[in-house]
Image: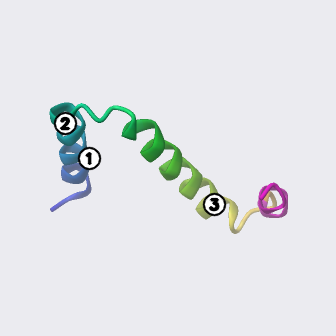
Amino acid sequence: MNKLAILKEFWDFLRARKKWWLAPIVIFLVLFGALLVFAKGSALAPFIYSLF
């Protein structure tokens, strides 16, 4: 199963069950996780970690 299949399955779940309120939560969590991963080795890390 590839990564795009997971996204398609999630999209089908949202459409079929009308759970549109889950989409912003999942998008925020993915973006937040990507921010932490990319900032880990950069000069911005002390500033981002001080926010939390």
Q: Is residue 19 left or right of residue 21?
A: left
Q: Is residue 25 magenta?
A: no
Q: Position of residue 29 (x, y in %)?
A: 51, 51
Quadrant of the rendered structure where residue 49 is? bottom right
The furthest residue to the bottom: 41
Side of 40 where 1 appears, left or right: left
Return the disc, 1 or 2, that comes first in the chain's sequence: 1
Q: Write down the residue under mark 3.
A: 36
Residue identifier under label 1: 7
**Which of the two labelled residues, at mark 3 and mark 1, occupies the earlier sequence position?**
1
The image quadrant that residue 38 belongs to is bottom right
Q: Residue at x 26, y 47 (%)?
A: 7
In percent of the image, x 33 and y 32: which residue is there?
20
- Which dot marks residue 35? none
Say few, some or many: other residues with alpha carbon within 10 Å of mark 3 (under 14 / 14 to 19 / 20 or more): few
What stretch of residues is rendered in magenta? 45-52
Q: Are marks 2 and 3 in contact (CB under 8 Å)?
A: no
User: Vertical placement of 13 versus 44: above or below?
Assistant: above
Which of the image's four quarters has the C terminus? bottom right
SS for callout 1: helix
For mark 2, what is the residue?
Answer: 17
